[in-house]
Image (cartoon, rainbow, N blue to C red):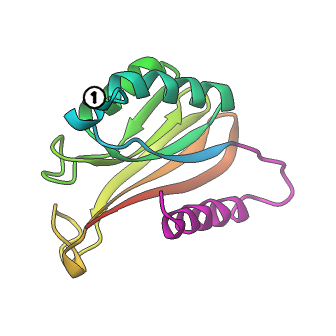
Amino acid sequence: MNYKNSIGILSVIIILLCGCQPDKKTIFTAASYNLRNANSADSLQGDGWGNRCPIIARLVQFHEFDIFGTQEGLRHQLDSLKTSLPKYDYIGVGRNDGKKEGEHAAIFYRIDKFELLEHGDFWLSETPEKPSVGWMRFYRESALGDISNTKIPDLNFSFSISTWTI
């Protein structure tokens, strides 16, 4: 992940945390992870998805992330990660068809702590409602989820993750 992506993701997290009510102490752990799409070149080098998935799942479990965004994940990667993390569900669609095809910008969340109220996906382009290439010929697909904490009824927030591909 490059410096600009890190700053953007950190900014989103800070904005989310500032929106929490100051009189109530609300703590949850958020993260972002670039899954790197599954490809044969990685597998030939010994660091294919089959090797990376268990490591990522252990990382999520160790840090007890409550919500985390992913970039570059293909549908089968997201599904295998979800299988490895039964306390989580995810939202997000493929950038190629707005359904399953292509890389996803997905949001995973703990189902025992959060309830998904609404979600949507959009492309940072002239036609954000449908899969499209954006300005300067980039694919920029984002997932946005409005989520509530089931243990703290007054806590509602939005979490967004974006992927920019040249």
Q: Residues within 10 Å of mark 1 (few under 14, many from 20)?
A: few
Question: Is 149 positioned to the left or the right of 138 in the image?
Answer: right
Position of the C terminus, as image quadrant, is: bottom left
Residues 42 and 141: in front is 42
Which residue ends up furthest to the front in the rendered image? 45
User: What element does badge 1 sit on?
Assistant: helix
**Residue drawn 84% across the image and 51% down it:** 24
Q: Residue at x 24, y 71 (%)?
A: 138
The picture places residue 79, in percent across and down from the top left corner, at 32, 27
As drawn, the residue found furthest toward the right would be 23
Give yes or no for residue 27 being in the magenta stretch: yes
Q: Position of residue 84 (x, y in %)?
A: 44, 18
Region of the chain picked out in magenta, as a range = 1-28
Q: Would you say residue 39 is visible in this rendering?
A: no
Position of 117 with respect to 102 (left or right) is right
Q: Is residue 19 magenta?
A: yes
Residue 105 appears in the figure: yes
Residue beneath label 1, please? 43
Between 46 and 81, which is closer to the camera in this rendering? 46
Considering only vertical position in the picture, is 164 above or below 150?
A: below
Q: Is residue 76 left or right of residue 159?
A: left
* Residue type, numbered disc 1: Ser
State the image quarter where residue 51 is shown. Answer: top left
Percent position of residue 11, x then y: 61, 68
At x 53%, y 43%, the residue is: 68
Give the residue drawn at x 62%, y 59%. 13
